[in-house]
Amino acid sequence: MSITATGVPADTLDPTVPAPATNVAEYGFEGRFEDWADDARYFEYSKAANPIGSGHTPKVPVVRFAPELYDDGPTRIVPLDLSQELGITSGAATSPGLLASFVRVRAGERISTSPNATSQLYYVLHGGGFSAVNERLVQWEKGDFLTLPAGSRSTFHADSDTALYWVHDEPLLRYLGAKATEPRFRATKFRRADAVAELAAIAARPGANDKSRVSVMLANAEEEQTLTITHVLWAMFGLLPAGQEQRPHRHQSVALDLILDAQPGCYTLLGTRLDERGDIVDPIRVDWQAGGAFVTPPGMWHAHFNESGAPAHLIPVQDAGLQTYLRSLDIRFTNPR
Ligand SMILES: [Fe+2]
């Protein structure tokens, strides 16, 4: 046996030199060693180093969901399911980690939810009622946000015809093979009146209209490190003033954008590259539809435009709580022109 300068026998660390066989009987065990090598695969580096870039891993698509999906008909949950496009076979998903749905509850009816999720966000598009969540009661009305932690079993009772936008992270839990059991924040209501007042105060500040964003970030007191609405989810209540353009930005979180009100002429441009002026090259245009939603894929540049004569409101929901915690959010902005 040769000895290296550090005193470690040279062939100890050399994987091409096999180790001596072990006799289990010497350790008091009976039986044979199993061969666990069936599922082991080996790729030359360049064949597996960038499965997203090579197209092996499906990209998150830009998809728009219309309000007609839920504005009529029986009480039901309408999942915005892109699992097929994402190559996910274990259940519905709008992005790899999140599932967004519209929930319609007719007046006097109810619907129950209990996803295996660490975080749920409900936004009341219209209607009103109350929820029983693990035997506790909470009221809600149009414009309220409700966040629920792991282990929440809920029934939503509608006093009037109700529509909810619902986002949770069950697809992430399914991918991990994990059960969410430990609540990481308290169930929280963001009252419509408070969110609207905060947005109005921000919009009234001098120079607010010169900023590319007039928005309230919604955060939970528990999330001191990420400043997000839950430890996984991120949500914003935003105003795009008439005649305004938000310069392009990008982030590694996915955005499941909900449009509240928008006249024709409000739209988002999305693309993978910027030109030397900071404009998006060969953009995809997504026209906003009041009560509709669309997906902004991770890493894509996007810019919002309001060429209508009226203000528009939007609520992007993202997995940016998780991305911020992982230090992988990588949010970038272009400079104002
Ligand atoms: Fe964004």
Image (cartoon, rainbow, N blue to C red):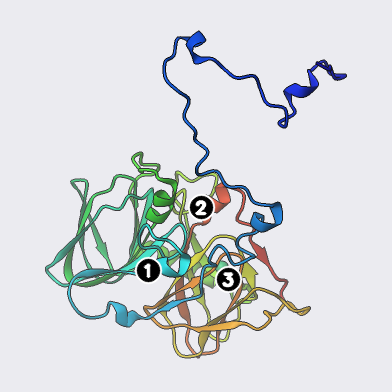
The residue that disc 1 covers is 81
Report the mark closest to the observer, 2 or 1: 1
Identify the residue at image location x=60%, y=81%: 245
**Secondary structure of residue under mark 3:** loop
Spatial CA distance of label 3 from label 2 is: 20 Å
Report the mark closest to the observer, 3 or 2: 2
Q: Quadrant of the N terminus?
A: top right
Kindly indicate the quadrant of the structure image that contains residue 125. bottom left
| Residue nearer the viewer, 62 or 279 | 62
The residue that disc 2 covers is 321
Q: Where does the image place residue 243, in percent across and percent down from the top left?
A: 57, 86
Q: Where does the image place residue 315, in percent across and percent down from the top left?
A: 45, 69
Identify the residue at image location x=26%, y=52%: 114
Ligand 1 shows up in which quadrant of the image?
A: bottom right
Looking at the image, tell me whether mark 2 or mark 1 is earlier in sequence order: 1
Callouts 3 and 1 close, C-beta under 8 Å: no
Report the mark closest to the observer, 3 or 1: 1
The correct choice, above or below, for 58 with respect to 232 in the image is below
| Residue nearer the viewer, 311 or 334 | 334
Callouts 2 and 1 close, C-beta under 8 Å: no
